[in-house]
Amino acid sequence: MTGKSSAQPERTGFRSPMFWGMVLVLVVIDLVTKSWAFASLDEREIRWVAGSWLGFQRLLNPGGVFGIAQGATTILTVIRVFAVGLLIWLAAKQALRNRRGVFTLGLLTAGAVGNLYDNLSAFTGWADPNGHVRDFVRFDLGPAPSWIPEQIWLFDPWPIFNFADSCITVGFLLLLTGLGRVEWPGSESEGRQGQESAA
């Protein structure tokens, strides 16, 4: 026996080297790629790297993903600050052995921090003075095939995005499919983890 209640397992995800290592590396990749794109691409240039379906095109996004909440940069900044805090809090609630949960939260946190960095530039001058998010990856599959309604075809082109958006998308898909195995406080999985830790 460890002397700890089975309902209160040690929660060390916040101190996980994998979590903080992921956040650091992924945020650096995001910021470096954004800086490269905005330093090397002209304002209206599209630089194709794979046919005419994948390329780079710089864009300052004053809203959220898919162009939502255009012009609401300040509100989105506040939301992202709270999101980062919530994700770090959730990471602290993960058991050390829950690598998939820590991995998923690392992806989401890195993505949120990467875009929050751009938002905070409105106050710090780090990047865009208006705090708009820097996007640069263009994915374009052209017009919809004849058997797919144009209204649901999102790839002509797909909204321009960045590396941070990719981290958020992958993390969200892991959560949605259950592969992320994030332990929510008070959930049954947390109780089972506690019993395993006390055994």
Image (cartoon, helix red, strand yellow):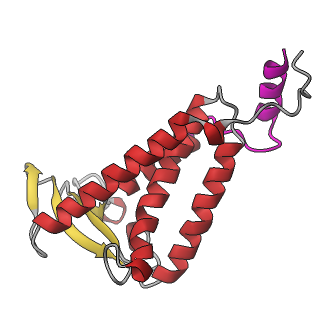
Image coords of residue 14 (percent x, y)? 64, 42
- Closer-to-camera residue (194/171): 194
Residue 58 quadrant: bottom left
Image coords of residue 110 (percent x, y)? 46, 52
Q: Which residues are magenta?
A: 177-199
Quarter that holds the N terminus:
top right
**Left or right of 47: which side holds 92?**
right
Q: Residue at x 19, y 68 (%)?
A: 38
On screen, residue 4 above or below 67: above
**Left or right of 23: which side holds 40?**
left
Residue 35 quadrant: bottom left
Image coords of residue 73 (percent x, y)? 46, 80
- Residue 179 at least partly seen: no
Residue 199 quadrant: top right
On screen, residue 76 above or below 10: below
Specify whether residue 148 is painted magenta.
Answer: no
Specify whether residue 184 is painted magenta.
Answer: yes
